[in-house]
Image (cartoon, coloured by chain):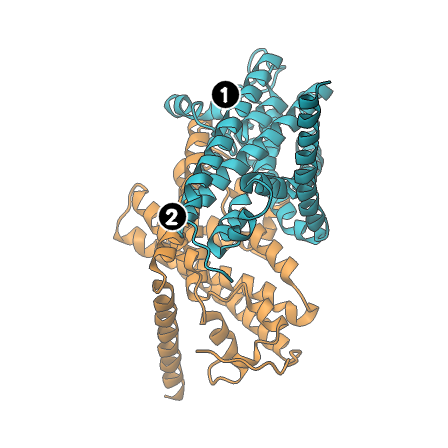
Chain colours: A cyan, B orange
Amino acid sequence: MSAATRRLRARLRAVARKYGLIAATGLKSRLAYLANYAGSMLTYGLFVFVFSRIWTAAFLGRAPAEGQGGAATIAGYDRTMAIWYFIVAEISVFGFGRFFWRLADDVKSGQVAYLLARPYSFVGYHWAEAMGPALVDMAVFVAEGILIGLLVAGPPPLLEPARALAVLGSLLLAGSLQFFLQLSIAMTAFWVEENAAFFWIFQKLALVVGTLLPIEFLPDAARAVAVFTPFPSLSYAPARIAVAATGSEALRLVAAQVLWLAGAVALANLVFRAARGKLAVQGG
Amino acid sequence: MAKRSTFRAYARFLGAAFRANLLAVMEYRINFLIQVFGMMLNNAAFAFFWGVLIDRTGGVGGYGFEDVMFIWAVVSSAFGLAHVLFGNIRSLGRIVMQGELDLYLLQPKDPFLNLLVSKTVVSAWGDLIYGFIVLCLLPGFGLERLLLFSLLSVSGGLVFAATFAAAECLTFFMGNSQAISGALTEFLLSFSLYPETIFDKGMRWVFYSILPSGFIAFLPLAVFKNLDWRLAPLLLLVACCYAAGAYALFRAGLRRYESGNQMGARI
């Protein structure tokens, strides 16, 4: 092993340790306040219950489709698939959907100024700090989703270990993509202080493109546009992999997530570089 | 005569509280407009969802798109109205817990009403406006439907306010009822915004008692579809009963309230 390779490996280890520590700190702080989960767990459970009833009513009395094992389908989804789709899609929203508020507050309060002088990347620091606790959030909602799903819809339509791993991987990619997109929006606070409207638009587009409904339900024109946006990579990808995707489709969905993630990381860094020039530190 | 002057004094007081709240939110106009826009956007996202779903299925639980849009409209307006006029309904428990009730007890107006109207919720204006926008877009819109819708929003708003306030009043008896009132808010909103028929018949009695979605959304839908004015006063009467129940619970709780000797001022 050459000296250069050794140096590179040592540097990578140091970087991983640094951001790992930041993530672990965030995770510990989240674990210290487990009671805070009660509210969001209740909301998630209630949402899943209500939507399970909506899907049950939507499929009631529909004629079974040929080649679907006798189950009625709408846009290629039967009742069980639709409910499990919703359970997985909402994990992305509940686990990773609220980074924006804290990030935007940090910009508005001037907290960011303290981070700029420290020996880590501003974007990387926030990613590690947010993703540590978000992993706990995701685990909580995965466990709750599985429990409620079993009660209201029975077992998931496709039970394979490789699929379960692919869903988890896709959820983690969705979480990071959510983070970098929300960070980019949050940093608009450097220019426009009241930037919540940008986030709301983003949030609602994410909700209608692949969260409340699979994108196969959308009208043709809307679906044709939606596939060229990052929104299907946020909730649709993990949910589709969980209930329907073949191996090659799953690979395509994950590849699209990786590409959008790379784009979102670049965007967040670009916005940060542009924003840094707007920051005026006045002592204190 | 004395009763009439008391009524007038309260009407003046409510008008003054409303004006003060409105001026306070208009002080931050951009924030106000953004919050209003955000709430309307949120509701519009669900309208899109229902449009797409019903287009695919032809109806859910016997509800068509216009039925669902009506319940979203009336629930949004009722919820908005409750929080525009009685902005403190969901802070009542916290105010009791932190001993901040003393402030209202020392003032000449009824503490329950005084406390509830002393704040408005900015985003609730968005809900209130959204309901009326949807109403305008529904087929058959006219003056009669506008009046009926307004009446149904008032009765629904009263039921919302009374139910939330009653849940918050449990703080007097339990010490902290935040979890219960938070859960009740979630349940009441969630059940009110979706067709009644998707839920099992066995649980529908709940919608006409502790989670009164039936009086906020489901009965108003029947009244509105049939332009049945006879049921409208009955809904108002039910709303008044809920309000009286919440007020009685507050008065009962007040007897258990212990002052924290906290100094405070309302400016």
Is label 2 in a helix, a strand or a loop?
loop
Res. B261 image quadrant: bottom right
Q: Is residue B234 visible?
A: no
Residue B8 versus residue B94 in the image, above or below: below
- The nearer-to-camera label among 1 and 2 is 2
Marked residue nearer the N-terminal end (1 or 2)? 1
Callout 2: residue from which chain? A
Q: CA distance from mark 1 to mark 2?
A: 43 Å
Residue that label 1 marks: A75
Q: Is residue B130 left or right of residue A259?
A: left
**Foreground residue among A4 and A166:** A4
Number of marks present in the image shown? 2
Amino acid on which the number 1 mark rests in the picture: Ala
Is label 1 in a helix, a strand or a loop?
loop
Percent position of residue A188, x then y: 42, 45
Residue that label 2 marks: A191
Amino acid on which the number 2 mark rests in the picture: Trp
Percent position of residue A55, x then y: 56, 32
Q: Is residue A14 visible?
A: yes
Q: Work out whether disc 1 and disc 2 sit on a shared chain.
A: yes
Callout 1: residue from which chain? A
Q: Are marks 1 and 2 in contact (CB under 8 Å)?
A: no
Q: Is residue B44 left or right of residue A160?
A: left
Residue A116 versus residue B82 in the image, above or below: above
Q: Is residue B41 left or right of residue B144?
A: right
